[in-house]
Image (cartoon, rainbow, N blue to C red):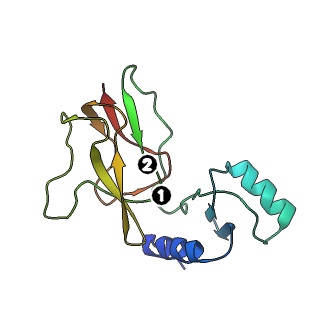
Amino acid sequence: MELTEDDVLEILKLFEQSKFDFLQLQQGERKITVSKGGYVPSGAVTAVAAATGPVAAPASTAVAAPSHLPSRPAPAAVEPGLVPVTAPMVGKFYAAPSPSDPPYVEQGTKVAAGATVGLIEVMKVFTSIKTETAGTIEQILVKNGEFVEFGQTLFLIRP
């Protein structure tokens, strides 16, 4: 059985509603790790799982997407002077408020600090992605509708 993106989102929804703080699901090569509270490096997840077995253990809000979903490329060297805008959570990225609306920003768009540049949807809840720095959108590194990970660089801004 292959996990779909909808399956992953349903797992996240059920986990959020549960009393558990930590979940690790492995199916063959695919592995999903979810925890509430903060980022847990994969080595620490293995250590927690080894120490506690399949029982829930306190941890963080980190999700490792199943291996069949497109994986995030290794962080490339950011050109000096560019400021990354990163994903505040795991979910589906949307470039516009609705399919019929134009995108919030395009390459070359000037933005103010605190400007909304996109949305991330998890379980039908939308969260705005805001800039911390004023400047010009130099690069857009994700596509509309793409599944993104916590901390993934979405945009590069030239202040």
For the C terminus, the quadrant is: top left
Give how far across and how far down residue 95 sits, in percent: 26, 53
Above or below residue 70? Residue 154 is: above
151 w.r.t. 101: above or below = above
Callout 2 crowding tier (Cα within 10 Å): few <14, some 14–19, many ≥20: many
Q: Report helix, strand or loop for mark 2.
A: loop
Q: Amino acid at mark 2?
A: Ala
Label 2 and label 1: CA atoms lie apart by 7 Å
* Residue 80 on image: x %, y %: 40, 19
In the picture, measured across the screen, residue 89 lies left or right of residue 57, that is left
Q: Are marks 2 and 1 in contact (CB under 8 Å)?
A: yes
- Residue under the image location 19 percent in, 42 percent down: 106
Local packing at callout 1 (Cα closer than 10 Å; few below 14, some 14-19, many 20+) is many
User: Which part of the image, by quadrant, shows the N terminus?
Assistant: bottom right
The percent position of residue 66, horizontal first and vertical second, equals 55, 63
Residue at the extreme top: 80
Q: Residue visible at 46% across and 73% down?
A: 4
Looking at the image, residue 118 sits to the left or right of residue 72; the answer is: left
Q: Amino acid at mark 1?
A: Val
Tell me what residue is drawn at x 48 percent, y 58 percent: 90
The correct choice, above or below, for 103 with respect to 131 in the image is below
The residue that disc 1 covers is 90
Q: Disc 2 designates what residue?
A: 87
Q: Relative to 42, does residue 26 appear above or below in the rendering?
A: below
